[in-house]
Amino acid sequence: MKKYILIALVFIGTTLAAQNTNQPKLESKGTLTVATYFYDNGSVQQEGTFNKNGALEGLWTSYDFKGDKLTQGNYSNGIKTGKWFFWTENSLKEVDFVDSKITSINEWNRKSELAISMK
């Protein structure tokens, strides 16, 4: 009987430990909180910072479950600003934001230098 209880406790402990491996990692750095989020497989899903009010601030980067970059861009007090980049298997989109509004889009694919330009 003790053997079964021990096996059950080991199983429960292992399950709980596995569930905590993909919890967000939060670190205070001055007035910012650096956040890293993880996929179930342990790879980084996205990383960036929050300001003291809890708004997205500075550079944010997201990745697919294999670790390939999907998105990278900047926030200023929760507002998208500047150049953002969106990667797919066959293309790269460069999107310019001012106050979270798109001002221009450029898209490149593997076969052309500039596929689309919208200004």
Image (cartoon, rainbow, N blue to C red):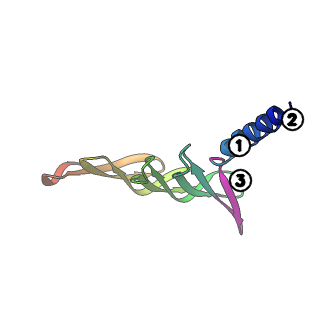
Answer with left or right where residue 85 lies relative to residue 4.
left
Query: Disc 3 designates what residue?
Result: 53
Q: Amino acid at mark 3?
A: Asn
Comes first in the chain, label 2 or label 3: 2
Query: Disc 1 designates what residue?
Result: 14
Q: Amino acid at mark 2?
A: Lys
Where's the N terminus, which quadrant? top right
Can residue 119 be spotted in the picture? no
Residue drawn at point x = 71 percent, y = 46 percent = 17
Can residue 10 be spotted in the picture? yes
Q: Is residue 28 part of the magenta span, yes or no?
A: yes
Answer with left or right where residue 15 lies relative to residue 62.
right
What label does residue 2 carry, if any? 2
Region in magenta: 22-34
Q: Is residue 45 part of the magenta span, yes or no?
A: no
Confirm or deny contact between disc 2 and disc 3 (CB under 8 A): no
Comes first in the chain, label 1 or label 3: 1
How many angstroms separate mark 2 from mark 3 (CA)? 51 Å
Please state the horizontal and vertical placement of residue 52, each as a whole percent of the image: 71, 58
Picture layout, residue 45 above or below residue 6 = below
Camera-nearest residue between 106 and 100: 106
Picture layout, residue 21 above or below residue 29 = above
* Residue furthest bottom as drawn: 30
